[in-house]
Image (spheres, rainbow, N blue to C red):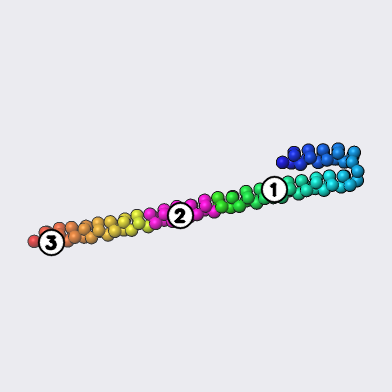
């Protein structure tokens, strides 16, 4: 896009040398308008890229947050299952020792 604007400016400058003052002013105005259009287009493109980047990063952040929450939930459930298993094992061991003690006593 810059190449096009530069080429248009060079052609306009060459044409200006052979034209009247009024034609030179109109050509200069047209060149300024082309430059302004290029600048506006570039600015819009930069804004679009920034907005798309922000959306992509926000989506990635949300995905990571959700994955972290799922991992944490799974770890909590695993910990609770381990605690319950340990409690049952301790209770069954205690009952087995009681039964053994009663068997020895009788």
Q: Is 67 one of the magenta-colored residues?
A: yes
Dominant SS of magenta comes to helix
Mark 1–mark 3 contact, CB under 8 Å?
A: no
x, y percentage for residue 59? Answer: 52, 52
Q: Secondary structure at mark 3?
A: helix
* Magenta part of the chain: 58-75
Q: Is 28 one of the magenta-colored residues?
A: no
Could you say which disc has been placed on residue 102 in the image? 3
x, y percentage for residue 12? Answer: 83, 40
The structure residue drawn at horizontal position 76% and vertical position 46%, both measured from the top left corner, is 34
Question: Is residue 58 toward the left or the right of residue 72 in the image?
Answer: right
Which residue is the site of mark 1?
41
Badge nearest the viewer, 3 or 2: 2
* Sequence order check, earlier mark of 1 and 3: 1
The structure residue drawn at horizontal position 87% and vertical position 44%, both measured from the top left corner, is 23
Q: CA distance from mark 1 to mark 2?
A: 38 Å
Q: Secondary structure at mark 1?
A: helix
x, y percentage for residue 2? Answer: 74, 41
Which residue is the site of mark 2?
66
What is the quadrant of residue 69 in the picture?
bottom left
Question: Is residue 76 toward the left or the right of residue 54 in the image?
Answer: left
x, y percentage for residue 42? Answer: 70, 47
């Amino acid at each position: 896009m810059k190449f096009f604007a530069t080429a248009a400016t060079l052609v306009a400058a060459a044409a200006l040398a052979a034209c009247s003052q009024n034609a030179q002013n109109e050509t200069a105005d047209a060149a300024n308008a082309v430059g302004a259009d290029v600048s506006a287009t570039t600015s819009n493109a930069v804004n679009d890229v920034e907005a798309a980047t922000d959306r992509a990063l926000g989506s990635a952040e949300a995905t990571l947050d959700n994955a972290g929450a799922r991992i944490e939930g799974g770890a909590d459930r695993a910990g609770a299952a381990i605690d319950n298993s340990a409690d049952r094992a301790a209770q069954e061991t205690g009952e087995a020792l009681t039964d053994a003690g009663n068997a020895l006593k009788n």
